């Protein structure tokens, strides 16, 4: 993982079949407990995929997530950090 300008996280990798995947991610803090973020990925096998999420931090190790995914649509979840 590398940081690009504007604090964008980037990842590039190649699989054993020669396929390539490029991933760009960005998180923007909106308030002390709320973050807005997004991820876009391009895979030579699966093509484009994207996610946008809004996180609400409940505690140091837990957050409630509302997310839209380009393939699966809307969802809600719980993020636990160790």
Image: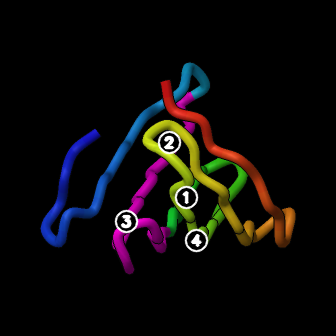
Identify the element where label 3 is drawn: strand
Residue corresponding to mark 4: 54
Identify the element where label 4 is drawn: strand
Q: Residue at x 36, y 44 (%)?
A: 11
Classify mark 1: residues with Cα within 10 Å, few (<14), some (14-19) or many (20+): some
Specify start and end residues of the magenta stretch as a single range. 18-37
Real-space Cα separation, disc 4 to disc 2, in angstroms: 28 Å
Magenta segment: does it hold 81?
no
The image shows residue 65, relative to residue 37, as above or below, that is above
Quick one: label 2 or label 1, which is nearer the N terminus? 2
The dominant secondary structure in magenta is strand
Classify mark 3: residues with Cα within 10 Å, few (<14), some (14-19) or many (20+): some
Residue corresponding to mark 3: 26
Residue corresponding to mark 1: 42
Classify mark 2: residues with Cα within 10 Å, few (<14), some (14-19) or many (20+): some
Residue corresponding to mark 2: 20
């Amino acid at each position: 993982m590398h940081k690009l300008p504007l604090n964008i996280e980037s990842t590039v990798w190649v699989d054993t079949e020669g396929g390539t995947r490029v991933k760009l991610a960005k998180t923007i803090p909106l308030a002390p407990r709320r973050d807005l973020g997004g991820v876009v990925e391009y895979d030579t096998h699966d093509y484009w995929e994207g996610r946008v999420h809004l996180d609400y931090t409940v505690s140091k190790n837990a957050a409630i997530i509302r997310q839209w995914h380009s393939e699966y649509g809307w969802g809600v979840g719980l993020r636990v950090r160790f």
